[in-house]
Image (cartoon, rainbow, N blue to C red):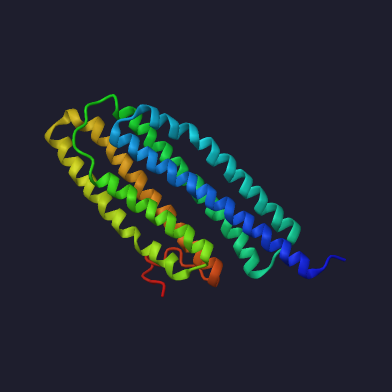
Amino acid sequence: MEDPLKTRTHFDQEMKDLQDAILRLGGMVERNIYQAVEALKKRDLLLAEKVIEADVEVDELENDVEEECIRLIALRQPMAKDLRSLTTAMKITHELERMGDLAVNIAERTLELCEEPPIKPLIDIPRMAEHAQLMLRKSLDAFLREDVDLALEVCDSDDLLDQLNDQIFRELITYMIEDPKTIACATRLVLVARYLERFGDLATNIGEVVVFMVEGRNIRHAKKLGKIPS
């Protein structure tokens, strides 16, 4: 019969390896979203194509992490917090893969935008990207440190992205009304802002599942229902 202490030690190491893999995945996604927006700012076709090609690595690592989570659930049959930790890891991995897809979407719009003259300097979109990356880093830090306060901070900070997204939309609508020739370009920039706003939503989702992992309480839709988490 296997020593329970050795079993626990082995499981803890497996969880540590899983955390490391999730952090690597998060690093890939942050790099891709950064490069996608840099490609947009610099109108860099090669960098945009690089982001699209790099998504294969994100997908492969997501599959690896998910398979490892399933293996540990089947092999270790964890209970209570250990089970929450593994299901949280799977959910975070899924959100990160979706974030990677958003970076690809931005890169694809960049390829299209590079075929047209710019209509305005990019100011608020890079601001959105910086804030979105910060939310991602904080959400993964909260996961690693099991920090509920930091996770809730991520959830609360999503409002800035919503505000910037609305501001960009209103501004670009004005461009389209004043000059119909800008409609194609402005529409693509509206989409880029929407992708970044969605990126923040996914970081918020990570914050919410971290709270569930640590405390076992579900705060999804808390703002919408008027139940602000404490």
Q: Residue at x 62, y 49 (%)?
A: 66
Determine if residue 188 is in view: no
Q: Quadrant of the N terminus?
A: bottom right
Give how far across and how far down residue 157 sits, in percent.
Answer: 34, 61
Q: Residue at x 25, y 50 (%)?
A: 166
How many numbered marks have been drawn onto this rendered protein structure?
0
Position of 154 with respect to 61 (left or right) is left
Vertically, is 69 above or below 63?
A: below
Q: Residue at x 48, y 68 (%)?
A: 147
Q: Nearer the viewer, residue 219 or 6?
A: 6
Give how far across and how far down residue 86 sits, in percent.
Answer: 62, 59
Residue most toward the top?
Answer: 115
Give how far across and how far down residue 83 sits, in percent.
Answer: 65, 64
Q: Nearer the viewer, residue 69 or 217?
A: 69
Determine if residue 228 is in view: yes
Q: Residue at x 11, y 35 (%)?
A: 178
Residue most toward the left?
Answer: 178
Give how far across and how far down residue 36 sits, in percent.
Answer: 38, 38
Residue most toward the right?
Answer: 1
Vertically, is 214 above or below 161?
A: below
Position of 173 with respect to 56 (left or right) is left
Q: Quadrant of the C terminus?
A: bottom left
Please identify the quarter of the rendering in which residue 171 is found.
top left
Vertically, is 192 above or below 212?
A: above
Position of 130 with respect to 18 (left or right) is left
Vertically, is 69 above or below 172?
A: below
